[in-house]
Image (cartoon, grey):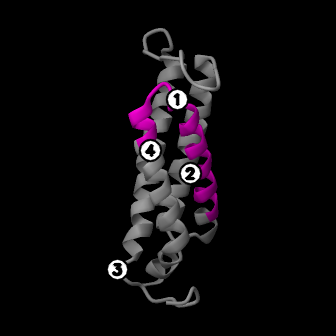
Amino acid sequence: MSTNDTSVTGWVGWGVFAAIVLLIGGILDALHGLQALVGPDTAYFVADAGLFSFDIEGWGWWHLISGLLLILVALALLSGATWARVVAIILVALNAIGQLTLIAAQPWLSLILLALDVLVIYALTVHGHELKARRRA
């Protein structure tokens, strides 16, 4: 299938998968950010390992903003917006780099999230164009 083909195939599920993963990740990121901002003294945050060190408030703002961005991009992906594919790939690539900085603190979670990031990038680069055709169908 060429990139100019506007037919919808079963592969559109990859694009929907990517959007749902981004939506869930955005919600979790935003909730973690709010938790860090509202109650940094009552939450458990371990910052002993990693390449970068942030204070709890800075970490909270980062995750709140990135979570809200991920939610908006995921909704735009589901509506078939082409710009959302590019923004999503950039945000997921940044998240993958961020996970590399956290491998020392949480190796299994970081590796799982890295694998999900790779799947989302694959889905959006190879099959993301079908999301626009899905909207028209």
Report, in whole angstroms, how far the alpha carbon at label 1 lies from the one at label 4: 18 Å
Labels 2 and 3 touching (C-beta < 8 A): no
Labels 1 and 3 touching (C-beta < 8 A): no
The residue that appears at 40% across and 36% down in the rendered structure is: 109
Report, in whole angstroms, how far the alpha carbon at label 3 lies from the one at label 4: 25 Å
Report, in whole angstroms, how far the alpha carbon at label 2 lies from the one at label 3: 24 Å
* Marker disc for residue 92: 2
Q: Position of residue 38 (x, y in %)?
A: 51, 18
Q: Secondary structure at mark 4?
A: helix
Tell me the amino acid under the disc marked 1.
Gly
Tell me the amino acid under the disc marked 3.
Gly
Closest to the camera, between mark 2 and mark 4, is 4
Upstream in sequence: badge 2 or badge 4 = 2
Query: Quick check: is 97 in the magenta stretch?
Result: yes
Q: Main secondary structure of the magenta part?
A: helix
For the record, the magenta segment spans: 86-111
* Marker disc for residue 113: 4
